[in-house]
Amino acid sequence: MARMHIGILTGGGDCPGLNAVIRAATLALLDAGVRVSGIERGFMGLMRGRMRPLTAPDVVDILDQGGTILGTHNKADPFHDVGHGGADVSQRVLAFAREKALDAVVVIGGDGTMTIAHRLHQMGLPMLGVPKTIDNDLALTERTFGFDSAVAVVAEAIGRLRTTARAHGRVMIVETMGRYAGWIALEGGLAGGADAILIPEIGFDPQAVIARCQQRERGDDDDSPSARFADGSTVICVAEGAAPIGGSMTVAQRLDDSPDPIRLGGVGEHLRAMLEPHLRSEVRTTLLGHVQRGGHPTPFDRVLATRFGHAAAQMALRGQFGQMVALQADACVAVPLESVAGRTRCVPLDHPLVGAARSLGVCLGEP
């Protein structure tokens, strides 16, 4: 009987921890006698027939490496191939899978990747998902690998910017990624000690943010608890999807050849323009951008990615396809791809971290 053959691909944006998943899944599958192949550049590899064998020497030393040894692609969509006039090439993907005797594909990615995987699974190519995104916004999983690494970058950046803010009595705005969810800004802002945190889930009142900055400018002249230790500076952590009450998110550009055409960005500069006329302090904006995606994964993400990769291998051996690995109550469980595809997990307004921020005197932009 032919050996089981499993493909692995990484789709969407890059993310710290991808290589740790590839390593864990590959080693666990090889140990069970399974043939493993790496599909290059995400779904583009299936569309263009780019695949190579994965062996233990290929993956054993990649645990702490950033990026992905397989490459990725955030515009590759078998149902809309921009390289061929937007044609549906999904049947070509299925034919390639049959030609290479692929029994299933482990897809590592975010909601866009899971949406494509679900459609291919429905067409007859068994799929198994692993949740990856720095945004931590996938449905039905409490954590995605890459998120902790991004939060660490944000927290360090805020710490560095705070020293400059204090030295000059400035307002420093730090804009984070996160798309339509505020997880990175919320956790990164709390970890870095931001004075204000603005997230998409809570529309902000510019006057409330102005008032907090003015309060901190007054410093010793103000006896309120939040200003008691003010040094004249304010650090604001704002998610790229944050918007003022009644306003809309700031769109940097549209990429019509992408499955997710909207690219958010620039809210930090808009906020600066709102604040500066009302403050004595100089206001500066720092856009962290792709710095949040790069570099080595944190130890937490290496462990989480390893757990996910191992769990995906065990699910594949059991023939448990059409599912995604998820973290629930600190256990790896299987959830249906159809329940994840196209959904966004936002910060609940009653989340304990939101309550903690309020009780610590952090301004959330609320009136």
Image (spheres, grey):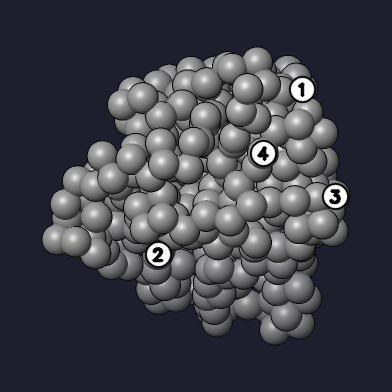
Q: Amino acid at mark 3?
A: Pro
Q: Position of residue 124 (x, y in %)?
A: 36, 25
Q: Residue at x 63, y 59 (%)?
A: 68
In front of the other: 90 or 116: 90
- Verify CB contact (< 8 Å) between mark 3 and mark 4: no
Image height of 357 relative to 244, above or below: above
Disc 4 is placed on an element classified as strand
Image height of 162 relative to 3, above or below: below
Q: Residue at x 78, y 28 (%)?
A: 32
Residue 34, numbered circle: none
How far separated are the C-alphas under marks 1 and 3? 16 Å
How far separated are the C-alphas under marks 4 and 1? 30 Å
Mark toward the viewer: 1 or 2: 1
Residue 299, numbered circle: 3
- Verify CB contact (< 8 Å) between mark 2 and mark 4: no
Mark with earlier residue (2, 4)? 4
Mark with earlier residue (1, 3)? 3
Q: Quadrant of residue 195?
A: bottom right
Name the side, left or right, on which 192 lies relative to 143: right
Residue 330, numbered circle: 1
In front of the other: 362 or 344: 344
Mark with earlier residue (3, 4)? 4
Q: Which residue is mark 4?
A: 35
Name the side, left or right, on which 346 lies relative to 329: left
Whether residue 173 is visible, yes or no, is no
In front of the other: 42 or 306: 42
Q: Which residue is mark 2?
A: 265
Q: Residue at x 16, y 52 (%)?
A: 87
Other-residue count near label 2 (Cα within 10 Å), few / some / many at <14 / 14–19 / ≥20? many
* The N terminus - image quarter: top right
